[in-house]
Amino acid sequence: MAERDRQKGSSPYLWLIRSIGVIVPRRLRANWKQEWEAELRYREEMLADWDKLNWKSKLDLLRRSLGAFQDALWLQQRRWEDEMIQDVRYGLRILRKQPGFTLIAVLSLALGIGANTAIFSLLDVVLLKSLPVHEPERLVLFGNGQGTGVTNGLPNQSWDLFSYPFYQQTRECNEVFSDVAALLSIPWTVHGNINANGVSAEPEKLEVQLVSGTYFSVLGVNASLGRVVTEADDENVGAHPVAVASHSFWERRLGGEPSAVGQTITIDKVAYTIIGVAPREFFGTTVGEAPDLWVPLAMGAQMPPAHWNGRNDKLFQSLHLIARLKDGVEAPQASAAVNLVFKRFLQDEVGAQPEPVQLQDIERASVELTPAGRGLSQLRQQFSLSLRVLMAVVGLVLLIACANVANLLLARATARQKEFAVRLALGATRLRLIRQLITEGILLASLGGLAGIVLASWGNRLLVVMASTGSEPLRLDVTLNGRVLMFTVLTSLLSAVVFGTAPALRASSLELNSSLKGSRGVAQPTTRSLLGKSLVTAQVALSLLLLVGAGLFLRTLINLQSLPTGFNPQNVVLFQLDATATGYEGTQLSNLMREVEDKVETIPGVEAASFSFFIFNQGQWSSPAFTRGPDLADGQSRNVRNNVVGTDYFNAMGIPLVLGRSFGPQDTNKSPKVAVVTEAMARRFFPDSSALGQHFGINGPASLDEIEIIGVVKDSKYVSLKEAWRPMAYYPHTQRDDPLSNFVVRFSSRPETIIPAVRTAIREVNRSLPIDEVVSLSEHIGRSLVQQKLVARLAAFFGLLALLLACVGLYGVMSYTVARRTNEIGIRMALGARSSQVLWLVLREALMLVLIGVAIGWLTSLAATRAASSLLFGLEPNDPLTMTLATLLLLTIALLAGYLPARRAAHVDPMVALRDE
């Protein structure tokens, strides 16, 4: 009866004990058999008196049982940790004993991992990284943010530039946004004096962003010092000369002192008070730009160089709008509400009796809301595909590097077969052997990852410089952050898996007896395995793919550089000046520019000098042109591009005059307005007569007779090298009040003497006229190809790197094959084989691997290059010449890599080879 009671009372507890026993791994139960049996005997003794135990004793027994289980697991974990430490120590010792192998493997991985990290860090900043603001996922942008500048036409399509009155109406008629902010689509580059301690310093260049009073509140950004711009700072035009300084500008130019708040910066005779400092991480809302100052939009009329005065004009559209969605509001709902407000706003503008064309325009006009959490970015559109292509390229380079290291590990594992056999014979399990080899692979990957981070930290800065279009690098923070480091860690671990697993499995699958008795002269099956040959073939195929891509991008760059521009860039230097920093306006400003032109043209060696509003790749100013000529044919646009230039501009740029005359001293602000037009404009607007003496206007139909054409010049390109010839008109700056920043100088002597002389002449005219940059016109044109240069240069570098890695892999495999077949080669030569026959025997095997890789590479290239077709110009993705040249280069280098081991095999001494046992 007592026995039954004891069994009955202890059954739940025994069930728990048995369950714990099942949970414990079998190997753990075997290792801890004695301890476990002793613990169970103790429990059985205690259970015999179960009914006599109080509840505290029962709980203590239960805690002891669970504690014993926990202790067993902890001890087993310590055993695993000890074994892991042993594996790491042994792996480090093995790698240290073979420094040549370790160096080659780590360097190969470092190049692949470092390249991936560097490209990913740039891709992360441009394409992926969110703005450092509050809840960036709730921000939306009106339009796509690609438009910049100002337009005054009635919207007739998806729109992304808006006026200040529309911004106000959107805020007033708003049920879907917490609030709306506006910023000028163009960041101003100005010159100002920092008034520190009551002393005005020399003018220096400043980057200024004009923003609405709601800008910082919508973004959820607070000042790290002082305060930010508010609605009260943006109410009255010209009445709020305040500014928020960026954190970098505060540290760089204001000394990083709290007393900087309250100091003033004078810009064009207006003193702006620093009211606050932005947080360190906040750079603004445009990726690649980092303003020094944020100034209220109300100060736009006082801010040079353009002095925007369209604040109350409903069609003066120059702003980007960013809004924050209310909680529970989704983008489609907000889009419908915004488009309703937009249509009503446009209908109010055209009035009660609009023209049919205006109604059609309003019907087509729309606002697309796009996510603004990652900021505005021209770089995103420009480099999106390029960065993805480069990411694929460096990914292939890493695969080639992994294949290279895997081949080295296969060869090294073959040489260590006796070591592995001895360890297996002494009781080591195959799993322990695999774990040891994988540990060595992880060590290699870790060393390669660390070296790759060092290379990436240097390569990041180089990439930013290569992606920049100006003399100063883009303001991009490409320092290694948590996400980039995580990418590097994952890449390293993935690399270890890719190159370490297969050699580890192959090395552990050896046959024990034959390995213990194996000799050097016998070629082991591993060295001739399909895996090793497949790795070499894959390396060759991927290398060919990268070489073909590099060839396509290089030829695209050459094609673009050979396109005609319409002007002669040789022996021309471009100076960037800021005439507004002198404080001159109107006629006084025009006279200053004319005086500078005359002064510079007196310098020996200077052939021509002229100011210009636009130079190639600086944007455009376009407007409708109205003439009295015949109506344009269907589909032809009335738009023309406009430029304001100096008297000797066409000589300075090397643009030939075809008809009529250029500008002269007779063209003043009191004489009739004149223009010189291009041949494309003459053909478009006056196809049946000479353009000389004809009139046109750009200020509406009432300005038909405003401007007289006095000359016709050859067509030129101004936006991009790919563009077609477009109608264009030039106007003399002596008849306009526009401040011009481009100063073009053509010279016939050495630039080393001309540039200092021009600087001196400019200072002699006005010492307050700052010179921001000096660059040759050829280099300036080359900046328009920054995307193509970035892709071509990096693709060429990585293509050659991939070729080098593949050839090193081929050389290593063939050299090891020759070394393992030394005895066989000696026997062949002893039996009468000639050196040429031995040479061909080895070379044939290398050639077969290369040809198979080339065939696979051709097929892969035919399919893969189509993905990058939009980056090509003047070429088909499967260009035969490019593929042929890439194949010949690969075959030449690969055959050289295979020839060297074959040549060594052909010169083997038969007597030495026969003793190689």
Image: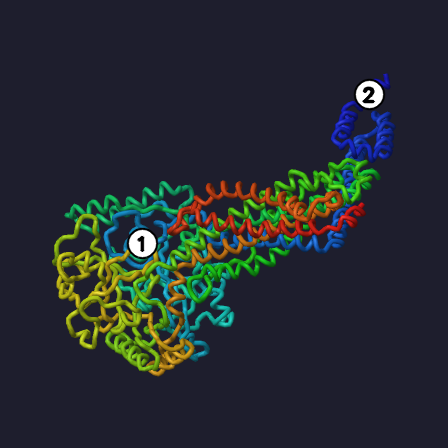
Whole-percent x and y of residue 632?
16, 52
The residue identified by callout 1 is 161
Whole-percent x and y of residue 502?
67, 40
Residue at x 36%, y 71% (from the top left corner): 572
Number of marks drawn: 2
Residue 341 visible in the picture: no
- Identify whether 132 is placed above or below 779: above
Which one is nearer the viewer's eye here, 231 or 406? 406
Q: How is the image coloured?
A: rainbow
Residue 670 visible in the picture: yes
- Identify whether 689 is placed above or below 532: below
Disc 2 marks which amino acid? Gln
Which one is nearer the viewer's eye here, 303 or 716? 716
Residues at marks 1 and 2 touching, judged by CB atoms closer than 8 Å: no
Disc 1 marks which amino acid? Leu
Residue 483 horizontal side relative to residue 164, left or right: right
Q: Residues within 10 Å of mark 1 (few under 14, many from 20)?
A: many
- Counting residues from the start of the chain, the first of labels 1 and 2 encountered is 2
Q: Residues within 10 Å of mark 2 (few under 14, many from 20)?
A: some
On the rendered image, what quadrant is the N terminus found in?
top right
Residue at the front extreme?
A: 832
Foreground disc of the pair 1, 2: 1
On the rendered image, what quadrant is the C terminus found in?
top right
Helix, strand or loop at label 1? It is loop
Tell me which corner region of the image, top left, top right, bottom left or bottom right, holds residue 500: top right
Residue at x 16%, y 56% (from the top left corner): 687
Which one is nearer the viewer's eye here, 393 or 321? 393
* Label disc, if present, on residue 7 of the rendered structure: 2
